[in-house]
Amino acid sequence: MAEIKNYTVNFGPQHPATHGVLRLVLELDGEVVVRADPHIGLLHRATEKLMEHRTWVQSLPYMDRLDYTSMFINEHPFCLAVERLLGIEVPIRGQYVRVMFDEITRIFHHLFNLGTHALDVGAMAMVLYTFREREDICDILEAVSGARMHGGYYRPGGVYRDLPDSMPQYSVNRFKNEKTVKALNQARAGSLLDFIEDFTDRFPGYLDEYETLLTGNRIWKQRLVGVGAVSPERALQLGFSGPMLRGSGVAWDLRKKQPYLVYDRLDFDIPVGVNGDCYDRYLVRMEEMRQSNRIIRQCIDWLRKNPGPVMTDNLKVAPPQREKMKANMEELIHHFKLFSEGIHVPPGEVYAAIEHAKGEFGVYMISDGANKPYRVKLRSGAFQNLAAMDEMARGHMIADVVTIIGTMDIVFGEVDR
């Protein structure tokens, strides 16, 4: 009788569950995975190298395009790193605005992950629900930055501009009648803060809908419970962070352990899992969205009571106001130098990290005193998670590989860079 050998298959990169460009080489014994070998680099865009040839502010939009499902929060560690090298302080209102948009982006990202993870596993309706809420967040991002995705809103020294006093409104057209438009514009009558507050009022109800659809769903539990389990000790050894680490029961969150900006003034909890499997990581992300909603509400309350600047007044870093620039020669020179030459950052090296939706997202940069970085190295949470693919998938079925890819929350812009 002929000897039965393991066979090797390519899973991806064209498979929709591999989220774009992951090529997994699976060695299979029947339908059981013996070895999983991730091949990456198919979306390599040389982001870190390109930054060496752009000024500090011109490098910032590259950060948006790393993880294109959570844009604003990507800009944050880059700005923190530049600010530490410059030795400047962000105005307190600017810090609250940043924290609020970090948490809005965290919800934005988790909604994307939840919808597509469920879609990969076979729950078709979830993605329609989660993208309904993402549409509201897209409108918030567009109102404040002018772009629905790649906003480039954070700047070294603060944020690009303060929150607008009005929201764009829908108008009657051949797709929307007067009654529909009136309902859509109801929450848009006030300022951006009013719209965000309305969203935070509605959002816990939406999360309850998701819980009803998924949390107790026996098919969802059959596909997730016990799949890709990682012990707390092994999760630390593998370099996990974010929901991947907290799902294994380790309460590590940079917002609590190494607070930056105003997180130490805010009241929120860190959810942790028990079993370290895909289902626990799903529950952690669900509770994280509720906690982000709490943080956003606290930021809204503070921002309403405390007007002020959102950008540093250091004219070597931030452009002057246009009225002053047109009236004074000194401001005109500052404006010209900033936009023609850019910021000059003192020599030194720095590492700045934040708690991204995926885990620790850090920027290590070296400055040689010029108007552009000498070297930039990015630390992506998803890259560390993907390294555990072989260990997590071994012994599971092919169908479980899809579940594990979904729970890792991989976006290849920041894996390949």
Image: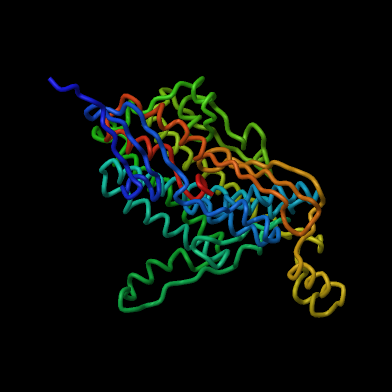
Where residue 377 sits in the image (x, y, percent)? 64, 45
Where residue 200 sits in the image (x, y, percent)? 48, 51
Number of numbered callouts drawn: 0
Q: Residue 390, can we see it?
A: yes
Where residue 393 sits in the image (x, y, percent)? 36, 29
Q: Residue 209, can we see it?
A: no
Q: Is residue 95 above or below residue 309?
A: above
From the viewer's perspective, is 380 left or right of 374? left
- In which quadrant will I find the N terminus? top left
The residue at the point 73 percent across, 69 percent down is: 339
From the viewer's perspective, is 11 left or right of 50? left
Quarter of image, res 359: top right
The residue at the point 42 percent across, 52 percent down is: 202
Nearest the viewer among 311 and 43 is: 43
In this view, the residue farthest toward the left is: 1
Nearest the viewer among 268 and 332 is: 332
Quarter of image, res 182: bottom left
Where residue 265 sits in the image (x, y, percent)? 67, 40
Please say which color scheme the image uses.
Answer: rainbow
